[in-house]
Amino acid sequence: MGKKFFTWNFDDGLEEDKEIIRILKSCNMGATFNLNSGLFGKRQMIGRIGNLGVKEIPQSKYNADKKTILKYSIHYRIPEDEIEQVYGGFEVASHTADHVDLTKLAPMESRWQVEEDQRVMGEIFQQPVVGFAYPFGRRNERTKKLLREIGIQYARTMQMAKDFRFPEDSMELPVTGWIAKKNTLAVMQKFVESESEEDQIFLMFAHGYELDFNTKECNFDMFQRICDMVASREDILCCSTGDAFRYHTNGGAYV
């Protein structure tokens, strides 16, 4: 029987991650946080429609009197002098230094965006950064080749997975569940009940601000419920995305 892995993937390095990490630690769960070193400490507003954050603007440019269909919430990123304390003990992965679409940049600019993010976080945590999340989910063969060249071992997309199998291409890791989607618990239940001779992975994707939206699907109670759903299962390993890949790739051993 194959192993079953559950991993959280959080983007952007947000203040909400502090409460997220408190809950993860209480459940003895791992997770991966995809950070933008060039945006540490930024103060922004996130505009949403329903459960989806669709537009970011600097807090200084936000006009509460301006009519818009978007509902805006404060969107703070954790400052650099708190990063080590907040994320220590968890996997951190690159999301580019400035949250940019690599497919629109010249090759040297793309390389700098990833290598600079790796360098800053490598110095903070004194360990190599080998995971990546594509900003906006956008990638092409050039960006995938670049990531391999500079030591990235796996990269997460925004594509929704059709099943629980590990992808053949580690640079094309899909999202199994997104906390903002209404069918999340149903997909989770299917994973919990599934059995396979092959290893399986469930990657749950989220932004911390989505939990602060406090809608029916996106709130901290839902986050706690999902954690409780898998953390107590002896047949599910709740770990970082990197650990899941290393365990799967190396025949049942973390290296």
Image (tube, grey):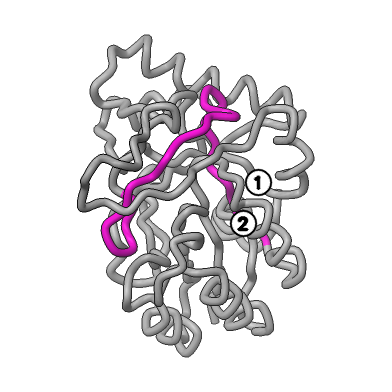
Q: Amino acid at mark 2?
A: Ala
Viewer-side residue, 212 vs 231: 212
Q: Which mark is residue 145?
A: none
The quarter of the picture where the N terminus appears is: bottom right
Provide the secondary structure element on which disc 1 rests: strand
Pointer 2 local density, CA inside 10 Å: few below 14, some 14–19, many at least 20: many
Q: Is residue 106 left or right of residue 44?
A: left
Counting from the top left corner in percent of width and height, residue 86 is at 73, 44
Q: Amino acid at mark 1?
A: Glu
Q: Is residue 150 left or right of residue 20?
A: left
| Residue 93 shows up from this direction | yes
Q: Is residue 164 above or below residue 111?
A: below
Q: Which residue is mark 1?
A: 91
Q: Specify the farthest residue to the top.
A: 108
Viewer-side residue, 152 vs 60: 60
CB within 8 Å, label 1 to label 2: yes
Residue 93 quadrant = top right
- The stretch drawn in magenta includes residue 150: no
Q: Specify the farthest residue to the bottom.
A: 193
- The stretch drawn in magenta includes residue 48: yes
Q: Is residue 64 above or below residue 249?
A: above
- What residue do we see at 47% from left, 90% from top? 193
- What residue do we see at 39% from left, 42% from top? 171
- What residue do we see at 59% from left, 29% from top? 41
Residue 229 quadrant = bottom right
Provide the secondary structure element on which disc 2 rests: strand
Viewer-side residue, 251 vs 14: 14
Q: Specify the farthest residue to the front.
A: 65
Viewer-side residue, 20 vs 239: 20
Which region of the structure is painted magenta?
A: 30-53
| Residue 205 shows up from this direction | no
Q: Which residue is mark 2?
A: 31
